[in-house]
Amino acid sequence: MGRGLVLLVNPNKVHPPIAPYALDVLTTSLEAADFEVEVVDLTFHREDWKSCLSDYFGARSPVLVGVTIRNTDTVYAFEQRPFVGEHKEIITEIRRLTDAPIVGGGIGFSSMPFALVDYFGIDFGVKGPGEEIICDLADALVTGRGTDTVSGLIRNTPEGVTRVPPPALTLSGRRTAAALPAGQFEDRTWQVDRSGTYVRRSGAPHKVDNLLYYQRGGLAGILTKNGCTYRCSHCVEPDAKGIRTGRRDVAAVVDEMQSLAAQGILDQHTTDSEFNLSISHAKNLLREIVRRKHADPGNPLNELRLWVYCQPSPFDEEFAGLLAAAGCRGVNVGSDHVRAEMLSGWKITEKGTTYYTFADTERLVRLCHANGMLTMVEALFGMPGETPQSMRECVDAFMALDATVTGFSLGLRLFPHTPLGIAMAERCDGVRTVAGLQSNTATEPIVLKPLSKCSGPVEYERQFMFDESGNFRLVCYFSPDLLEDTDTVTDPSGRWSRSVDLLWELVDPSDYHRVMLPTLAGSSEHDNNYADNPFLTSLGGLGYTGAFWAHWRDREAILRRAQDVGVVGSVGA
């Protein structure tokens, strides 16, 4: 049994299923530290999850339970469906069944970790990559060492939710005198295992079953680096993952990819903040894939179908050629907008400068298509300064790209430690609302407080998810300059329906097959929300693989077939 048993739990019951990559990462590190590790995955136990947990704890007694929170909610401004209520129900049941301490983590958890440690009533939390901290925590528990010696660990103490100071950090070449109270915008590369190969399994008892996820329509995630040096105003990742890039060893990453391909998992996608933002590292990784393919015709990497997330720049001819040679089938690019004056305050580097223009997006699409790769280009409407005219210009320019699929989203989910979330809290200053702040469940004007005026990180983070009574109130933002009635803009729960209607009007109906557009109802065959979407569920049920958007143009035929064979019911039923 080694040094003790650590249980890792995936509470995500949303379908299509997404393999909990983080649990493979944590399992790898814990096993290397001589702990026995088991996984209870509730994704495929949506109805019988209680009996699944009861059966497990009736037979096993772990020294530590880790729970991964991939998403706090759908992050979809027109649905605003929270997941943390379901997660709390599961954690409460775990607490009833075991006395083992519980630690939370994951990218969603890391967006508001102090508030979620408090809300879940758990013992510990980890902000950012967890492989080093969870091993140190498990060691402390089995040796009797105080958990206040575990660097970076968030602890639920009688004095409140606090964090053990992390190791000395260096920011912009200067040694910091003290960590910020919520651990925001730190270098987290020390938390990442950059040299080892993450072990990926299929079919092993009490482990993540990667092949099962793949067979149910989920791609296998691949992390080539952790963290992001950019400061895009709506993005949680620089804060949650860290402001420096921790690059993983190229051979270790390709070993992992080869292992998955050998298991029959051929469609793999990058889970970096963006694959090309450390372009030299990305090119070296692609070269290693190509080298192995050429060296051995029997290498399973020869069957690899790679899907990547990128920003419009840097992206040159060499990179496009390497992607194609490595087996890349499609590139998903987050261009977000066309207007330079909006991007200049929105998509920026750590120094506050823009790093691409729309010409870079045009070049990327052109290079991808020339190299036989599909493209999905995404626009994000509703940032401060957005108007009907700026939407119109963006739609026209994006549709002229002739990407394989173009996605248009409207509205932004605000999180506590994104630049936009921080700015809105400072503008409210605890005494006023700001035009554009919205929540479907708001019962009064949304007034946020900056961290400096809160009792601590728990209070500050909670207000982005809950109202003062503890009810769910997911805070979103829509530019008040959009095409809406005054009553909508001033109503904190107003629905921005006219802007949705305008988006549909701006796209020619003959092009509907190649666009994703927001819908007020949510979860329809048209919208681009992921959670329990009938089209996406149909793909998995019918055996489709690869990025879901690669099949988007054929969605009507796919939905009809799924309904005919009983994979899904009638859309909207």
Image (cartoon, grey):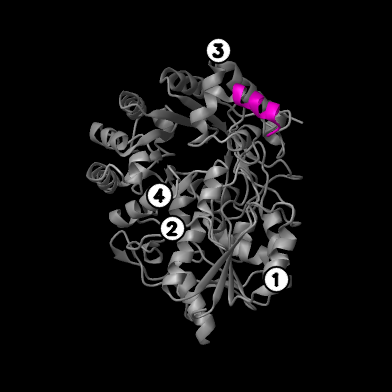
Which region is colored magenta?
557-567
Residues under labels 3 and 2: Cα distance?
45 Å
What residue did someone put label 1 on? 95
* Mark 2 or mark 4, whichever is nearer to me: 4
Tell which circle, 1 or 3, labels the residue nearer the N-terminal end: 1
What residue did someone put label 2 on? 185
Main SS of the magenta part reads helix
Tell which circle, 2 or 1, labels the residue nearer the N-terminal end: 1
Q: Is residue 514 visible?
A: yes
Picture coordinates of residue 559 (x, y %)? 64, 26
Tell which circle, 4 or 3, labels the residue nearer the N-terminal end: 4
Mark 4 and mark 1 residues within 8 Å of each other at the beta carbon: no
Three-letter code for the amino acid on which mark 1 is drawn: Arg
Name the quadrant containing residue 466: bottom right
Indicate the secondary structure of the residue bearing disc 2.
loop
What residue did someone put label 3 on? 510
Q: Is residue 416 magenta?
A: no
Q: Is residue 146 visible?
A: no
Q: Residue at x 69, y 65 (%)?
A: 53
Three-letter code for the amino acid on which mark 2 is drawn: Phe
